[in-house]
Amino acid sequence: MKKIIFMLALTIMSINGVKAFDIDVNKIELNSRTSNLTSKLNKTYNIDIEDFDNRIVSDPKVEEFSKKLTNISLSKNSIQKKKEQMTDYLYISSDNGFDTLNGSLFMQMYIEQLEKEKIEATKIKDIKTVNFKENEAMSFVYLADAMVNGKKQDVILVYWLKLQGEEYRLYYPWLKTGDSLNEYFKKVTDNEDKGIVIGESYNQLSLNSEDKISVSTEQLSHIYSDNKDSVVQITGMKGNGSNSYGSGFFIREGVIVTTWSLFMQLLSESNYIYANDCNGDSYEILGVIAAQTDYDVVILKIDQNAGKGVSFGTTTELKLGDNLFMINSKNNSGFSINYGSFISLNKGRLKNMFLLNSSDVGGALFNSDGKVVGINVSDQLMSELSYANSTDYLKKLQKILNKQDYKKITYTLLEAFKQNYYVSFNEEKTYNNITNDIWNEYKKIGNIEENIKLNLVKGIYNDGILSLRYKTNVNETIDSYYLVSNYAEELIKSGYKMTYEDNYKKIYKNNDYKVVIKNNLNYIIILIMEN
């Protein structure tokens, strides 16, 4: 994951009659501060990612067509009118009448489901696109303020498109609601509670022109039994007894892999981190062996020479529709196996039809031979579309680690991180010259008090601009922005759109407010201003 460091240079004018905040946020002069944990670690364990690129690029042509389809879907027109409008955009096959008939039936079912569940929304939060095969694409449209039968929840509209001539046409539309996604995860969790380890795919859709590659119970059982000792859950415990957790896997005995972003979350929100496996054994995290933040991976040493190292497959050998498998735990206790399918690979980034939630981040993706080809990242959760990073980049490191005795594998002590990186949740917030009325209004934006667990050392409100300065209590090797990632996620969730991003700042907007997040040495500064 690309590291994002924010720094804000503010000049607060104290001269009488001059505004305290005369700021053009797009012209603020910025200073860069490199924060690189890998420079502090043993360079023997460096991870080469020369051709890796974690950018998510959308196809503008697909995106624009998806907006047209979404406008029809969410219009106030009658069912019949919507069907007529949507029919104008349907894919018509010149040599396969079955394809054309299927598209028409799917479209009718889609519109009827929209009406049945009374789907309403006025904004598109995001559109992710996937191009696969030579003439097909898929788009995932995330709605910002969706209502389902009068209840606010997540809704994703999905369009499978095919090129007809030079224009995309609609082949197969469908939609997913937050309830249906949660029901799937609840089912998996309930099965794990009952000791059921064989799961299923959330989506049975085949992206192949041929029949879907079948997955038998025998194959699932075989992959699970061969690899269950190679996976772990990684948990961060808070002082109040609550925890947050994700996934990981053994690259060799005594050494586990997870994402850098999950590791940062656990460091910033927890007081103690440990790993546990499917046998009920728990392991203390001793420290960090290697990290590559652009690639979003960290290699951790545990306190025992335990576990079973995975075998890596070759990501570039994956084909469209190939099944992928994941072994982990939704309830942080029992483990189970579930599967999805591969869509595409570009510069080390996999796009998959594989529904993930936060507990799946850091989990290994196995191919049909039971070899690891990817590691799940958090770029898209609670969606049939998800992302993973190729594990081809870890093969060289695995060979190096396998040649060393467990006791001789060097690492930076986790204890050395704790005093500098763990957040204290008991520090009292102080609001300098902000009245209660103003604070009660602004604290609702992004749910500040709940989502920023940092010490607020200075707060100023003037001329419709609120400035909050938080002490980060981290040293230069950690990206401070991770400490307010929950706040940023809440802004997006509540309808804000990120309108600007570079290596130093992010700007979020809705119709009423603009929110700017910056990093200034050991402080995070948040500006909230009226549009």
Image: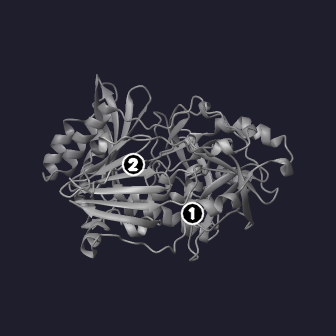
- Left-right relation of 184 to 219: left
Question: Where 43 falls versus 458 (above or below)?
Answer: above
Q: Which quadrant of the structure image shows residue 367?
A: top right
Number of numbered discs: 2
Question: Where 181 falls versus 315 (above or below)?
Answer: below
At which x and y percent is residue 88? 19, 35
Picture residue at 69% right of the left edge, 58% below the top: 416
Q: Distance between the Cα atoms at labels 2 and 1?
A: 39 Å
- Left-right relation of 326 to 457: right
Whether residue 389 is visible to the viewer of this picture, yes or no, is yes
Name of the residue lying farthest toward the top: 165
Question: 438 or 520: nearer the eye?
Answer: 520
Question: 505 or 124: nearer the eye?
Answer: 505
Mark identifier at residue 510: none
Question: 435 or 326: nearer the eye?
Answer: 435
Q: Amino acid at mark 2?
A: Leu
Q: Badge 2 local density, few (<14 within 10 Å), some, or many (20+)?
A: many
Q: Which residue is mark 2?
A: 8
Q: Which residue is mark 1?
A: 330
Query: What element does badge 2 sit on?
Result: loop
Whether residue 117 is visible to the viewer of this picture, yes or no, is no
Picture residue at 20% right of the left edge, 45% below the top: 71
- Left-right relation of 424 to 159: right
Query: What element does badge 1 sit on?
Result: loop
Q: Amino acid at mark 1?
A: Lys
- Give the mark toward the camera: 2 or 1: 2
At which x and y percent is residue 229? 74, 56
At which x and y percent is residue 2? 51, 41
Q: Badge 1 local density, few (<14 within 10 Å), some, or many (20+)?
A: many
- Left-right relation of 441 to 415: left
Picture residue at 31% right of the left edge, 34% below the top: 62
Question: 498 or 335: nearer the eye?
Answer: 498
